Image (cartoon, helix red, strand yellow):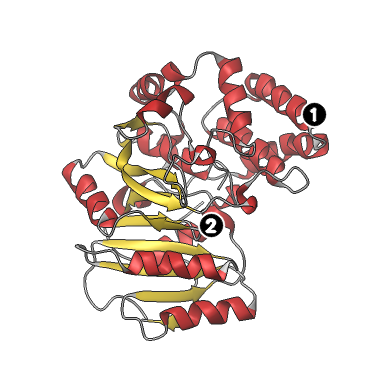
Amino acid sequence: MSLGPYPAPEHVAGARGPAGETDADVIILALDRAEETIAAIASARAQTGIARHVWITDQGSKPENLARLAAAVEGAPDATLVRLDRNWGVAGGRNRATALGRGRVVFALDNDAEFRDPDTLARAVRAMDAEPDIAAIACRILVFDSGADDLSSWGYPQGLLPRSAESFDVATFVGAGHAIRRRDFERTGGYDDALFFAWEEFDFALRAINAGQRIRYRGDIAVRHKVSGEHRFAWSGTRWFHFVRNRLYIGLKYGLAPASLLPRFLAYQVKGARNGVLAQGLRAGPAALGLWRAFRPAPGTESLYRLTPAARDYLARNDAAHRGGLGRRVRAEILAALPGASGAKAG
Protein backbone atom coordinates (compact mmCIF):
# COMPACT_ATOMS: atom_id res chain seq x y z
CA MET A 1 0.00 0.00 0.00
CA SER A 2 1.43 3.37 -0.97
CA LEU A 3 0.43 6.87 -1.98
CA GLY A 4 2.44 6.60 -5.08
CA PRO A 5 4.01 7.97 -7.11
CA TYR A 6 1.22 7.12 -9.50
CA PRO A 7 1.41 7.36 -13.28
CA ALA A 8 0.03 10.66 -14.50
CA PRO A 9 -3.62 10.22 -15.47
CA GLU A 10 -4.96 11.37 -18.82
CA HIS A 11 -6.00 15.02 -18.77
CA VAL A 12 -9.46 15.35 -20.30
CA ALA A 13 -10.70 18.90 -19.71
CA GLY A 14 -10.39 21.96 -17.52
CA ALA A 15 -7.21 23.48 -16.13
CA ARG A 16 -4.00 21.48 -16.01
CA GLY A 17 -3.87 22.39 -12.34
CA PRO A 18 -4.45 25.33 -10.01
CA ALA A 19 -3.09 28.68 -11.11
CA GLY A 20 -1.72 29.43 -7.63
CA GLU A 21 -1.52 28.15 -4.09
CA THR A 22 -4.62 26.47 -2.71
CA ASP A 23 -5.85 25.77 0.79
CA ALA A 24 -8.04 22.83 -0.16
CA ASP A 25 -8.54 20.29 -2.88
CA VAL A 26 -12.02 18.93 -3.53
CA ILE A 27 -11.92 15.45 -5.03
CA ILE A 28 -14.88 13.85 -6.80
CA LEU A 29 -14.73 10.32 -8.21
CA ALA A 30 -16.77 9.82 -11.37
CA LEU A 31 -18.22 6.70 -12.94
CA ASP A 32 -21.19 7.54 -15.16
CA ARG A 33 -24.12 9.24 -13.31
CA ALA A 34 -23.20 12.35 -15.30
CA GLU A 35 -26.11 14.53 -14.20
CA GLU A 36 -25.43 14.02 -10.48
CA THR A 37 -21.69 14.40 -10.96
CA ILE A 38 -22.07 17.69 -12.84
CA ALA A 39 -24.21 19.01 -9.98
CA ALA A 40 -21.55 17.94 -7.47
CA ILE A 41 -18.88 19.72 -9.52
CA ALA A 42 -20.96 22.91 -9.68
CA SER A 43 -21.50 22.77 -5.92
CA ALA A 44 -17.75 22.44 -5.31
CA ARG A 45 -16.88 25.27 -7.68
CA ALA A 46 -19.43 27.49 -5.94
CA GLN A 47 -17.61 27.27 -2.59
CA THR A 48 -16.52 30.68 -1.37
CA GLY A 49 -14.05 32.14 1.11
CA ILE A 50 -11.28 29.66 0.36
CA ALA A 51 -8.58 29.07 -2.26
CA ARG A 52 -9.51 25.68 -3.70
CA HIS A 53 -9.27 23.47 -6.75
CA VAL A 54 -11.71 20.78 -7.84
CA TRP A 55 -10.32 17.49 -9.14
CA ILE A 56 -12.73 15.16 -10.95
CA THR A 57 -11.25 11.70 -11.40
CA ASP A 58 -13.07 9.47 -13.85
CA GLN A 59 -12.76 5.71 -13.44
CA GLY A 60 -14.41 4.38 -16.57
CA SER A 61 -17.49 6.37 -17.55
CA LYS A 62 -19.12 5.66 -20.88
CA PRO A 63 -17.82 7.97 -23.64
CA GLU A 64 -21.04 9.97 -23.79
CA ASN A 65 -20.99 10.57 -20.03
CA LEU A 66 -17.31 11.50 -20.02
CA ALA A 67 -18.06 14.02 -22.78
CA ARG A 68 -20.76 15.60 -20.61
CA LEU A 69 -18.34 15.93 -17.72
CA ALA A 70 -15.73 17.44 -20.02
CA ALA A 71 -18.21 20.02 -21.27
CA ALA A 72 -19.05 20.96 -17.68
CA VAL A 73 -15.45 21.98 -16.90
CA GLU A 74 -14.24 23.06 -20.34
CA GLY A 75 -12.19 26.24 -19.87
CA ALA A 76 -12.65 26.21 -16.08
CA PRO A 77 -9.60 27.67 -14.28
CA ASP A 78 -10.54 26.03 -10.98
CA ALA A 79 -11.41 22.47 -12.01
CA THR A 80 -9.62 19.58 -13.69
CA LEU A 81 -11.08 16.41 -15.18
CA VAL A 82 -8.73 13.45 -15.54
CA ARG A 83 -9.31 9.83 -16.49
CA LEU A 84 -7.63 6.87 -14.79
CA ASP A 85 -6.55 3.76 -16.64
CA ARG A 86 -9.20 1.64 -14.88
CA ASN A 87 -11.64 1.56 -12.01
CA TRP A 88 -9.52 1.53 -8.84
CA GLY A 89 -12.53 1.56 -6.54
CA VAL A 90 -13.21 4.07 -3.80
CA ALA A 91 -9.95 3.53 -1.92
CA GLY A 92 -7.63 3.50 -4.92
CA GLY A 93 -9.53 6.25 -6.71
CA ARG A 94 -9.30 8.59 -3.74
CA ASN A 95 -5.59 7.87 -3.36
CA ARG A 96 -4.95 8.86 -6.95
CA ALA A 97 -7.23 11.89 -6.83
CA THR A 98 -5.61 13.12 -3.61
CA ALA A 99 -2.13 12.78 -5.12
CA LEU A 100 -3.06 15.28 -7.85
CA GLY A 101 -3.37 18.26 -5.51
CA ARG A 102 -1.29 20.10 -2.94
CA GLY A 103 -3.87 21.76 -0.68
CA ARG A 104 -3.34 21.17 3.02
CA VAL A 105 -6.91 19.86 3.30
CA VAL A 106 -8.55 17.32 0.98
CA PHE A 107 -12.34 17.31 0.89
CA ALA A 108 -13.88 14.21 -0.69
CA LEU A 109 -17.39 14.72 -2.04
CA ASP A 110 -19.47 11.84 -3.39
CA ASN A 111 -20.60 12.35 -6.98
CA ASP A 112 -24.23 12.26 -5.80
CA ALA A 113 -23.75 14.83 -3.04
CA GLU A 114 -23.51 18.61 -2.80
CA PHE A 115 -22.25 21.05 -0.20
CA ARG A 116 -25.09 22.31 1.97
CA ASP A 117 -23.82 25.91 2.16
CA PRO A 118 -21.52 28.07 0.01
CA ASP A 119 -18.99 28.30 2.88
CA THR A 120 -19.04 24.65 3.97
CA LEU A 121 -15.56 23.99 2.61
CA ALA A 122 -14.10 27.16 4.17
CA ARG A 123 -15.55 26.23 7.56
CA ALA A 124 -14.11 22.72 7.32
CA VAL A 125 -10.65 24.13 6.62
CA ARG A 126 -10.93 26.63 9.47
CA ALA A 127 -11.99 23.84 11.82
CA MET A 128 -8.92 21.80 10.92
CA ASP A 129 -6.61 24.80 11.19
CA ALA A 130 -7.97 25.54 14.68
CA GLU A 131 -7.26 22.01 15.97
CA PRO A 132 -4.04 20.53 14.56
CA ASP A 133 -4.69 17.14 16.18
CA ILE A 134 -7.73 16.51 13.96
CA ALA A 135 -6.84 14.20 11.06
CA ALA A 136 -10.30 14.11 9.51
CA ILE A 137 -13.66 15.85 9.82
CA ALA A 138 -16.75 13.71 9.43
CA CYS A 139 -19.53 15.81 7.93
CA ARG A 140 -23.20 15.50 8.75
CA ILE A 141 -24.88 13.75 5.82
CA LEU A 142 -28.38 14.96 5.01
CA VAL A 143 -30.97 13.61 2.58
CA PHE A 144 -30.85 15.97 -0.37
CA ASP A 145 -34.59 16.48 -0.77
CA SER A 146 -35.75 16.60 2.85
CA GLY A 147 -32.76 17.87 4.81
CA ALA A 148 -33.25 15.08 7.35
CA ASP A 149 -30.36 12.95 8.52
CA ASP A 150 -29.45 10.31 5.95
CA LEU A 151 -29.78 7.21 8.10
CA SER A 152 -28.09 5.03 5.46
CA SER A 153 -24.99 7.20 5.97
CA TRP A 154 -24.94 7.28 9.78
CA GLY A 155 -21.66 5.50 10.48
CA TYR A 156 -21.59 5.96 14.25
CA PRO A 157 -23.17 4.33 17.31
CA GLN A 158 -26.96 4.48 17.15
CA GLY A 159 -27.07 6.14 20.56
CA LEU A 160 -25.34 9.20 19.14
CA LEU A 161 -27.94 9.80 16.43
CA PRO A 162 -29.98 12.23 18.58
CA ARG A 163 -26.80 14.34 18.74
CA SER A 164 -26.39 14.51 14.96
CA ALA A 165 -26.40 18.33 15.00
CA GLU A 166 -23.60 18.43 17.61
CA SER A 167 -19.86 17.73 17.46
CA PHE A 168 -17.93 14.86 19.05
CA ASP A 169 -14.93 12.61 18.50
CA VAL A 170 -15.56 9.38 16.56
CA ALA A 171 -13.71 6.29 15.34
CA THR A 172 -14.44 6.66 11.63
CA PHE A 173 -16.14 8.89 9.07
CA VAL A 174 -18.54 8.50 6.16
CA GLY A 175 -17.28 8.80 2.63
CA ALA A 176 -20.14 10.89 1.20
CA GLY A 177 -18.57 14.07 2.57
CA HIS A 178 -15.44 14.43 4.68
CA ALA A 179 -12.25 16.44 4.99
CA ILE A 180 -8.78 14.99 5.64
CA ARG A 181 -5.60 16.81 6.56
CA ARG A 182 -3.13 16.04 3.79
CA ARG A 183 -0.23 15.78 6.23
CA ASP A 184 -1.98 13.01 8.15
CA PHE A 185 -3.13 11.27 4.99
CA GLU A 186 0.42 11.08 3.69
CA ARG A 187 2.16 10.10 6.90
CA THR A 188 -0.28 7.26 7.63
CA GLY A 189 -0.11 5.79 4.12
CA GLY A 190 -3.49 6.93 2.76
CA TYR A 191 -6.11 4.36 1.85
CA ASP A 192 -5.40 0.69 1.23
CA ASP A 193 -5.99 0.04 -2.49
CA ALA A 194 -6.75 -3.60 -1.73
CA LEU A 195 -10.00 -2.69 0.03
CA PHE A 196 -11.52 -1.35 -3.23
CA PHE A 197 -14.65 -0.31 -1.36
CA ALA A 198 -16.10 -0.85 2.14
CA TRP A 199 -14.40 0.06 5.42
CA GLU A 200 -11.61 2.13 3.83
CA GLU A 201 -12.45 5.13 6.04
CA PHE A 202 -12.34 3.01 9.20
CA ASP A 203 -8.99 1.54 8.19
CA PHE A 204 -7.49 5.01 7.67
CA ALA A 205 -9.04 6.32 10.89
CA LEU A 206 -7.44 3.56 12.97
CA ARG A 207 -3.98 4.56 11.76
CA ALA A 208 -4.64 8.25 12.32
CA ILE A 209 -5.87 7.58 15.86
CA ASN A 210 -2.87 5.36 16.51
CA ALA A 211 -0.66 8.25 15.41
CA GLY A 212 -2.21 10.42 18.13
CA GLN A 213 -4.77 12.25 15.99
CA ARG A 214 -8.54 12.55 16.35
CA ILE A 215 -11.48 12.08 13.99
CA ARG A 216 -14.07 14.78 14.66
CA TYR A 217 -17.74 14.60 13.70
CA ARG A 218 -19.13 18.09 12.98
CA GLY A 219 -22.89 18.32 12.81
CA ASP A 220 -22.64 21.94 11.68
CA ILE A 221 -20.61 21.05 8.56
CA ALA A 222 -22.91 19.20 6.20
CA VAL A 223 -23.44 17.85 2.70
CA ARG A 224 -26.70 16.93 1.03
CA HIS A 225 -26.82 13.41 -0.33
CA LYS A 226 -29.06 12.15 -3.12
CA VAL A 227 -29.95 8.77 -1.69
CA SER A 228 -30.73 6.41 -4.55
CA GLY A 229 -31.24 2.75 -5.29
CA GLU A 230 -27.58 2.49 -6.29
CA HIS A 231 -26.64 3.01 -2.66
CA ARG A 232 -28.98 0.32 -1.39
CA PHE A 233 -27.57 -3.02 -0.49
CA ALA A 234 -27.55 -5.40 -3.47
CA TRP A 235 -27.60 -8.97 -2.20
CA SER A 236 -27.14 -10.24 -5.77
CA GLY A 237 -23.90 -8.31 -6.34
CA THR A 238 -20.53 -8.53 -4.60
CA ARG A 239 -21.07 -5.87 -1.97
CA TRP A 240 -21.57 -8.42 0.83
CA PHE A 241 -18.33 -10.13 -0.17
CA HIS A 242 -16.39 -6.86 0.11
CA PHE A 243 -18.16 -5.90 3.33
CA VAL A 244 -17.22 -9.17 5.08
CA ARG A 245 -13.79 -9.60 3.52
CA ASN A 246 -12.62 -6.08 4.29
CA ARG A 247 -13.80 -6.07 7.90
CA LEU A 248 -12.00 -9.34 8.61
CA TYR A 249 -8.90 -8.18 6.74
CA ILE A 250 -8.73 -4.97 8.78
CA GLY A 251 -8.97 -6.96 12.02
CA LEU A 252 -6.07 -9.15 10.91
CA LYS A 253 -3.99 -6.14 9.84
CA TYR A 254 -4.27 -4.65 13.32
CA GLY A 255 -3.09 -7.74 15.10
CA LEU A 256 -6.19 -9.81 15.81
CA ALA A 257 -5.66 -13.57 15.63
CA PRO A 258 -7.74 -15.34 12.97
CA ALA A 259 -9.47 -17.43 15.66
CA SER A 260 -10.62 -14.31 17.48
CA LEU A 261 -12.51 -13.19 14.38
CA LEU A 262 -14.47 -16.43 14.13
CA PRO A 263 -17.58 -15.19 16.04
CA ARG A 264 -17.80 -12.17 13.73
CA PHE A 265 -17.30 -14.36 10.66
CA LEU A 266 -20.04 -16.76 11.76
CA ALA A 267 -22.46 -13.91 12.47
CA TYR A 268 -21.88 -12.62 8.96
CA GLN A 269 -22.58 -16.06 7.51
CA VAL A 270 -25.91 -16.30 9.32
CA LYS A 271 -26.99 -12.97 7.85
CA GLY A 272 -25.69 -13.90 4.40
CA ALA A 273 -27.49 -17.24 4.45
CA ARG A 274 -30.76 -15.57 5.33
CA ASN A 275 -30.41 -13.33 2.29
CA GLY A 276 -29.24 -15.87 -0.24
CA VAL A 277 -25.59 -14.83 -0.44
CA LEU A 278 -23.93 -17.44 1.75
CA ALA A 279 -21.38 -18.16 -0.98
CA GLN A 280 -20.24 -14.51 -0.94
CA GLY A 281 -19.67 -14.57 2.80
CA LEU A 282 -17.89 -17.91 2.74
CA ARG A 283 -15.54 -16.70 -0.01
CA ALA A 284 -14.79 -13.60 2.02
CA GLY A 285 -12.99 -15.53 4.75
CA PRO A 286 -10.21 -17.05 2.63
CA ALA A 287 -10.00 -13.83 0.62
CA ALA A 288 -9.37 -11.83 3.81
CA LEU A 289 -6.61 -14.23 4.82
CA GLY A 290 -5.08 -13.86 1.35
CA LEU A 291 -5.07 -10.07 1.55
CA TRP A 292 -3.55 -10.17 5.01
CA ARG A 293 -0.72 -12.48 3.96
CA ALA A 294 0.06 -10.26 0.97
CA PHE A 295 -0.19 -7.01 2.94
CA ARG A 296 2.93 -4.87 3.30
CA PRO A 297 2.67 -1.57 5.19
CA ALA A 298 3.85 1.59 3.48
CA PRO A 299 7.41 2.42 4.56
CA GLY A 300 7.41 4.27 7.87
CA THR A 301 3.87 3.20 8.85
CA GLU A 302 4.64 -0.23 10.27
CA SER A 303 4.09 0.83 13.90
CA LEU A 304 0.63 2.20 13.12
CA TYR A 305 -0.79 -1.30 12.78
CA ARG A 306 -0.42 -2.13 16.48
CA LEU A 307 -2.84 -0.04 18.52
CA THR A 308 -1.25 1.85 21.39
CA PRO A 309 -2.87 2.04 24.85
CA ALA A 310 -3.85 5.64 24.05
CA ALA A 311 -5.54 4.55 20.81
CA ARG A 312 -7.40 1.75 22.57
CA ASP A 313 -8.60 4.21 25.19
CA TYR A 314 -9.75 6.63 22.47
CA LEU A 315 -11.73 3.87 20.73
CA ALA A 316 -13.23 2.68 24.00
CA ARG A 317 -14.40 6.17 24.98
CA ASN A 318 -15.61 7.39 21.61
CA ASP A 319 -17.02 4.26 20.03
CA ALA A 320 -17.25 1.04 22.08
CA ALA A 321 -18.80 2.83 25.06
CA HIS A 322 -21.77 3.73 22.86
CA ARG A 323 -22.19 0.32 21.20
CA GLY A 324 -22.44 -2.33 23.93
CA GLY A 325 -21.05 -5.87 23.76
CA LEU A 326 -19.58 -7.78 20.82
CA GLY A 327 -22.92 -9.25 19.73
CA ARG A 328 -24.54 -5.86 19.62
CA ARG A 329 -21.57 -4.35 17.78
CA VAL A 330 -21.56 -7.08 15.13
CA ARG A 331 -25.31 -6.69 14.68
CA ALA A 332 -24.81 -2.95 14.18
CA GLU A 333 -22.14 -3.62 11.57
CA ILE A 334 -24.43 -5.99 9.68
CA LEU A 335 -27.26 -3.48 9.80
CA ALA A 336 -24.84 -0.94 8.35
CA ALA A 337 -24.99 -2.84 5.07
CA LEU A 338 -28.75 -3.05 4.83
CA PRO A 339 -31.03 -0.74 2.83
CA GLY A 340 -32.38 2.18 4.78
CA ALA A 341 -30.73 1.10 8.03
CA SER A 342 -28.43 3.16 10.17
CA GLY A 343 -24.76 2.44 9.69
CA ALA A 344 -21.65 3.13 7.72
CA LYS A 345 -21.93 3.19 3.98
CA ALA A 346 -19.62 0.72 2.33
CA GLY A 347 -17.64 3.06 0.14
Q: Residue at x 51, y 31 (%)?
A: 254
In this picture, is 10 found above or below 185?
below
- Is 321 or 35 nearer to us in this picture? 35
> Is residue 118 found left or right of 284 in the rendered image?
left
Question: On screen, 43 above or below 291?
Answer: below
Q: Residue at x 70, y 28 (%)?
A: 268
In the rendering, at what x and y percent does residue 201 appear? 47, 43
Task: Mark 1 or mark 2: name the one nearer the start of the chain.
Answer: 2
Residue density around tag 2, few if under 14, some if 14–19, many if 20 or more, within 10 Å: many
Q: Taking 10 as reference, is 136 left or right?
A: left
Residue 11 makes an appearance in the image: no
Give the residue number, with chain letter if any, for mark 2: 92
Residue at the limit of the structure toward the front, as seen here = 146
Q: Residue at x 31, y 75 (%)?
A: 78
At label 1, counting other C-alpha atoms closer than 10 Å, the crowd grade (few under 14, some 14-19, many 20 or more) is few
- Looking at the rendering, which quadrant does residue 343 occupy? top right
Residue occupying image coordinates x 47% and y 51%: 145
Quadrant of residue 53 in the image? bottom left
Q: 137 or 84, which lies in front?
A: 137
* 87 on left or right of 8: right
Question: Residue 131, how many percent across, how many down?
Answer: 20, 40
Figure check: 155 above or below 2: above
Measuring from the top left, give residue 36's x and y in whole percent.
Answer: 52, 65
Distance between mark 1 and mark 2 Cα atoms: 32 Å
Residue type marked 2: Gly
Label 2: which secondary element: helix
Q: Are marks 1 and 2 in contact (CB under 8 Å)?
A: no
Front one among 273 and 140: 140
Q: Which residue is mark 1?
A: 274
Secondary structure, mark 1, is helix
Give the amino acid at mark 1: Arg
Residue that extends furthest to the bottom in the rendered view of this protein: 75
